[in-house]
Amino acid sequence: MPVPRRLIATTAGLPLAFVLAGTLAACSGSSSANRQPHQGSGTASVVNGVQQLTLHASDFRFSPSMITVHPGKVRIILVNDGGGAPHNFQVPAFPAEFIPLTSNGQQKQATFTAPAPGTYQFVCTIHLKQGMDGKLVVLPD
């Protein structure tokens, strides 16, 4: 059903440019970041000589969002149980450590060597702007 021109031109006596600017401002920030808090921390367990941890991707968040390991071989299993969007996993400080796009209901994994002790960010490269990141903490041996 078409909207009458006089209703489009003004809304509650306000100029159209003012109404549109307010509408656009309200829309532009509403989906730029996930407002949900980051969830939990996890420590890798040794399985067949490799530190292993399962990381869940859901609601544009990783759970746990803080992973603790020691230097050496680490296997991350990414489980996408988020109900829609595909997610991946990358540690930008060492970009070869990457789990490719994992669709909803799937899981993929990567094994890499954790570097020297320190704190490193991990991200979903396609949802970083929505706040989908976490911390990889490498403790000394």
Image: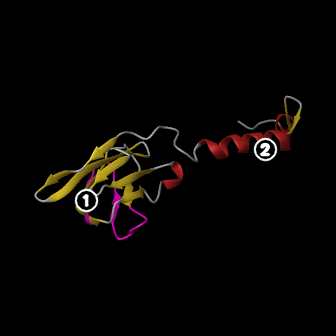
Specify which label sits upstream in the sequence, 1 or 2.
Answer: 2
> Magenta stretch containing residue 48, yes or no?
no
- Which residues are the magenta region? 91-112
Comparing 89 with 43, the one in front is 43
Q: Which residue appears farthest toward the top when viewing the image?
A: 12
Q: Position of residue 85 (x, y in %)?
A: 41, 50
Q: Nearer the viewer, residue 28 or 16?
A: 28
Q: Name the residue furthest bottom.
A: 96
Q: Which residue is mark 2?
A: 21
The residue depicted at 38 percent of the width and 62 percent of the height is 90
Q: Which mark is residue 72?
A: none
Tell me the distance, in whole angstroms, between the alpha carbons under discs 1 and 2. Answer: 45 Å
Location of residue 15 in the rendering, given as x and y in whole percent from the top left corner: 88, 39
Expressed as whole percent of the image width and height from the top left, the position of residue 49 reads: 12, 59
Q: Amino acid at mark 1?
A: Gln
Quadrant including the N terminus: top right
> How many residues crowd mark 1 within 10 Å: few (<14), some (14–19), many (20+)?
some
Choose top left, top right, bottom left or bottom right for residue 141. bottom left
81 in relation to 14, above or below: below
The foreground one among 90 and 42 is: 42
Residue found at the far left of this picture:
48
Is residue 106 on the magenta stretch? yes
Kind of residue sitting beneath label 2: Ala
The reply, left or right, for residue 74 in relation to residue 31 is: left
Residue drawn at 38 percent across, 59 percent down: 118
Residue drawn at (84%, 44%) of the image:
17
111 horizontally vs 99: left or right: left
Give the residue at mark 1: 109
As helix, strand or loop, the secondary structure at mark 1 comes to strand
Count the numbered circles shown. Answer: 2
Q: Nearer the viewer, mark 1 or mark 2?
A: 1
Q: Residues within 10 Å of mark 2 (few under 14, many from 20)?
A: few
